Image (tube, rainbow, N blue to C red):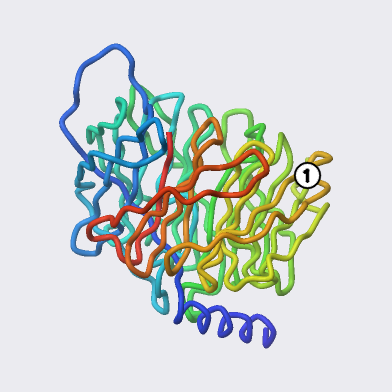
Amino acid sequence: MQKITRLGVAVATALATAALCTPSVSAAAHGGGHDRGGDHAVFVQTDNPAGNQIIAYRRAANGRLTQPRAYDTHGLGGVLAGSVADHLASQGSLTYDPRHALLYAVNAGSDTVSVFSVEGDRLALRQVVRSGGRFPVSIAVHDDDVYVLNALDGGSIQGYTVDHGRLHKEAGRNRRLGLDPNATPQFTNTPGQVGFTGDGSQLVVTTKANGSSLLVFNLSRSGAPAHSPVTTSLPGAVPFAFVPNSRHGLFLAEAGTNAVATFTVHRDGTASQDAFAATGQSATCWIVAARDLLYASNAGSSTLSGFRASDHGRRLTPLGNTPTDPGTVDAATTPDGHYLYAQTGINGIVDEFAVNRDGSLTRLGSRTVPGSIGGEGIVAL
């Protein structure tokens, strides 16, 4: 525990001079049209405690963000104790569901989730539901199944199904994580993300410093989680955020080691490391993929670290670091992998980048997102 405590203090110190991140979503009048779904848009969550909003941008052909519109989520943002630039200290607080053309946003301060329908770069609020716990921070979707991660009271997950554009809470899909509810500071000791493996058969939760583990719930054919997770302990790693690697793999950002690691999640729920690459930066917490390229956000260094993954993720080749505005947090890439957008929490700015063929990033500009200091949660379409 002493090692984890020292690590939490080190991360907190780094963030005091740079950043961590936070997410959220918003609403509008429902429009007509035949082609539903997001297109050439970037959605940014403010996580403002006075009233959470989603800021919707039109993405121009050159990658620049234009024509911002603000949508209220009808909920409140939240702030974890000890956080600086990332008030939610999580990944996946704003999630797009392409199958149903829906956008899900957490309202951490209200213990709710907002559901928006998406048409192009426009949103329409359809529903606000209870999160099934306290302080929701992350949302995952696969086919018709949605899971929300709640961060406080030891952590919990709550499952939903999607039908006709609405979430339906499943009473038998709530599981408590059993983390220490009194561990401090909150921002390093609350769970970081919930997400599915690529094939949708398993649900993964990162615990950060509160256990420094990967929790894997095997899912039934109906989508219900096992009664308890299989735990893979990663002492000192502080697993924060991940993206899927093929059907049963993960690319994981580790805040404790300031590194990116590749893991295989086995059928029995255990996980084993395949590759490891240090960023050489501070507070490596978030990660995003663009084809075979990975970019990790380093809140303490205000940089993005690039890697090329090869040999099915068993090899990670460093591509160098790119500076951002202060407090690099959550990031998103476009479906074609040509553009990357990084939230920076200290001043509430989104930095715009073009992704070059060699994996380097060319800065295009930046946008100040109103009311989003400390906010996190971003989607690019």
Q: Residue 301 appears in which quarter of the rendering?
A: bottom right
| Image quadrant in which you'd find residue 16 | bottom left
- Residue, x 19% and y 47% (percent of image)? 72
Could you say where residue 317 lies in the image, as x and y percent from the top left?
Answer: 77, 52
The residue that label 1 is drawn on is 313
Say which of 146 and 359 sits in front. 359
Left or right: 351, with 369 as reference point: right
| Callout 1 crowding tier (Cα within 10 Å): few <14, some 14–19, many ≥20 | many
Q: Is residue 206 above or below residue 126?
A: below
Q: Position of residue 272 (x, y in %)?
A: 81, 54
Give the x, y percent position of residue 50: 18, 63
The residue under the point 35% across, 61% down is 375
Q: Is 62 positioned to the left or the right of 234 in the image?
A: left
Q: Is residue 235 left or right of residue 209?
A: right
Between residues 362 and 152, which one lies in front from this camera angle?
A: 362
Q: Residue at x 64, y 59 (%)?
A: 253
Q: Position of residue 363 (x, y in %)?
A: 47, 51
Quadrant the N terminus occupies: bottom right
Residue 160 in sight = yes
Looking at this view, is 264 or 36 the one in front? 36
- Total numbered labels placed on residues in the image: 1
Quadrant for the C terminus in the image: top left
Element under disc 1: helix
Residue at image point 72% right, 47% down: 308
Residue 165 to residue 48: above or below:
above
Q: In screen coordinates, is 67 left or right of 44?
A: left
Residue toward you, 240 or 222: 240
Q: Quadrant of residue 306?
A: bottom right
**Residue situated furthest left in the rendering:** 29
Disc 1 residue type (three-letter): Gly
